[in-house]
Amino acid sequence: YGSMGGVVQRSPRFSELNDDDVRYFEEILGNKNVIQDEDKLSAANIDWMHKYKGASKLILQPCNTDQVSQILKYCNSRCLAVVPQGGNTGLVGGSVPVFDEVIVSLSSMNNIISFDKVSGILVCEAGCILENIMSYLDNEGFIMPLDLGAKGSCQIGGNVSTNAGGLRLVRYGSLHGSVLGVEAVLANGTVLDMLKTLRKDNTGYGLKHLFIGSEGSLGIVTKVSILTPPKLSSVNVAFLACKDYSCCQKLLQEAKRKLGEILSAFEFLDSQSMNLVTNHLEGARNPFPTSLHNFYVLIETTGSDESSDKQKLEAFLLGSMENELVSDGVLAQDISQASTFWRLREGISEALMKAGAVYKYDLSIPVENLYNVVEEMRSRLGDAANVIGYGHLGDSNLHLNVSVPQYDDKILSQIEPFVYEWTSKHRGSISAEHGVGLMKANEIFYSQSRETVQMMTSIKNLMDPNHILNPYKVLPHSITS
Ligand code: FAD
Ligand code: 2HG
Ligand code: ZN
């Protein structure tokens, strides 16, 4: 219900898996990559939040593009539904089966194919874990243009398929800019080689963009080519306290002007988020424990001149305190202090999990209105729930989370559709970066027009006419079932 994407029925168009199917998969993949082990199945059937649960009986773990192609060709001919799965860290119920879909895991496709030190262009397989790519690049003197709390488990293929935003988007832009090419397999097994390593390529339609953010509903991404920025020598992190939301907003405007070219993250959290992390995460501590602040801002700068970058940030901090945009602030003295500040921000999702059940909303709203929805939600729900607001303020992206002891339909009916209607009224997006998945498939019209969804449907019908790829997700169930 609601957050679960409405009531969904298993589509009668799909076949049920039989022994012949399993035997065929064993022939093409070998026995060890056709997984029916109960423990592995239960982990792959449930999402990171433990909110969405499927009942798949089979995980396929291909080792190369050709195997992915053979799997899809067969599933398409048999009308077997498929869920592509990366690190299974998605937050909208897109990465797990809804019923008995076959899980195609990219985990074994985790090779780095090439890296060009001159251009900074990396080509790798979709199953590479983000953090592993980061360490590889670090050795080469480069960084990934995206970073997110799930880096230890999420895969680049999953990042591309969700068009993940994360903590550095304010500096390096979205994956639509930094992904230079993809190789993807269509539902019928056709391999599309669009694995370009060019910054510029205007030959015809930009088809790679269809795979960036389509959440496994149009094809399986098997390889990715990505432009990576050089690693710069000076990274500084400041953790600041603000008395109200209007100060956070003005601080952002100032930071864009005064830190412009070195600004690499601008994140915020409210005091409710701070309390949640410090209460639930071991070792997490408010840097300003003695006074009460309503908001906190984390600013990171990345540049190439250690002394002038630091001076710039210090001057910015001082100026912001003088004109009272900032009530208190501290500059990290070393990497370990910087990571304790990041932990306060990146650890919120984990703290929410420890606190109980959670309703999650990932909204794009113009900055001036962004926090109003948190306050309205708080007054709607009263004491029944802990409403917290935080996110990528530099990108106008709010993570509104409602934390409750356990899931409760009465509370849910107070939240939805209110939150979607509010966002739509303010011309925002109901999915800034996490995607639509199962959770919001039926809510897509809050952010997209009828005509646009119709065009998406035509594209889906063209690329996956039997709708075997990630059914019940992204587009309304009436279309994909
Ligand atoms: P999965 O969860 O496995 O899959 C996600 C979707 O992509 C599914 O629909 C799946 O079917 C599809 N998919 C996966 N791999 C492929 C493939 N190779 N080809 C086709 N389809 C595929 N997101 C942000 O945008 N910004 C954040 O800051 C952020 N922080 C997070 C922090 C935490 C602690 C967690 C748990 C999640 C966070 N996320 C964030 C959610 C985000 O979507 C994922 O972390 C990540 O991008 C998904 O990668 P994954 O490999 O885990 O994909
Ligand atoms: C983040 O920015 C992630 O921390 C997760 O996108 C947000 O859990 C959430 O709501
Ligand atoms: Zn986020």
Image (tube, grey):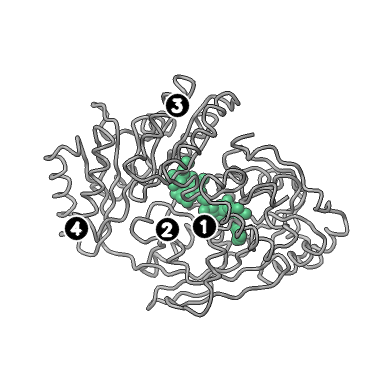
Image position, residue 80 (x, y; %): 78, 56
Disc assigned to residue 159: 1
| Lower sequence index among marks 2 and 1 | 2
Q: Is residue 333 left or right of residue 390?
A: left
Residue type at numbered disc 1? Asn
Residue pointed to by mark 2: 146
* Residue 365 lies in quadrant: top left
Q: Nearer the viewer, mark 2 or mark 3?
A: 3
| Lower sequence index among marks 1 and 4 | 1
In the image as oriented, which residue stretches furthest toward the bottom? 203
* Residue 363 lies in quadrant: top left
* Residue contact at pointers 2 and 1, CB within 8 angstroms: yes
Residue pointed to by mark 3: 386
Q: Is residue 481 above or below residue 75?
A: above
Callout 4 crowding tier (Cα within 10 Å): few <14, some 14–19, many ≥20: many
Residue type at numbered disc 3? Asn
Which residue: 47% across, 63% down? 133
Residue pointed to by mark 4: 309
Give the alpha-carbon distance from disc 2 to disc 1, as whole Å: 9 Å
* Residue contact at pointers 3 and 1, CB within 8 angstroms: no
Task: Give the quarter of the figure containing the N terminus.
Answer: top right
Residue type at numbered disc 2? Leu
Choose between 329 and 134: the one closer to the eye: 329
Whether the residue carrying mark 3 lies under 8 Å from ligand 2 is answered with no
Give the alpha-carbon distance from disc 2 to disc 4, as whole Å: 22 Å
Q: Is residue 84 above or below residue 330?
A: below
Whether the residue carrying mark 1 lies under 8 Å from ligand 1 is answered with yes
Whether the residue carrying mark 2 lies under 8 Å from ligand 1 is answered with yes
Give the alpha-carbon distance from disc 3 to disc 4, as whole Å: 39 Å
| Lower sequence index among marks 3 and 1 | 1
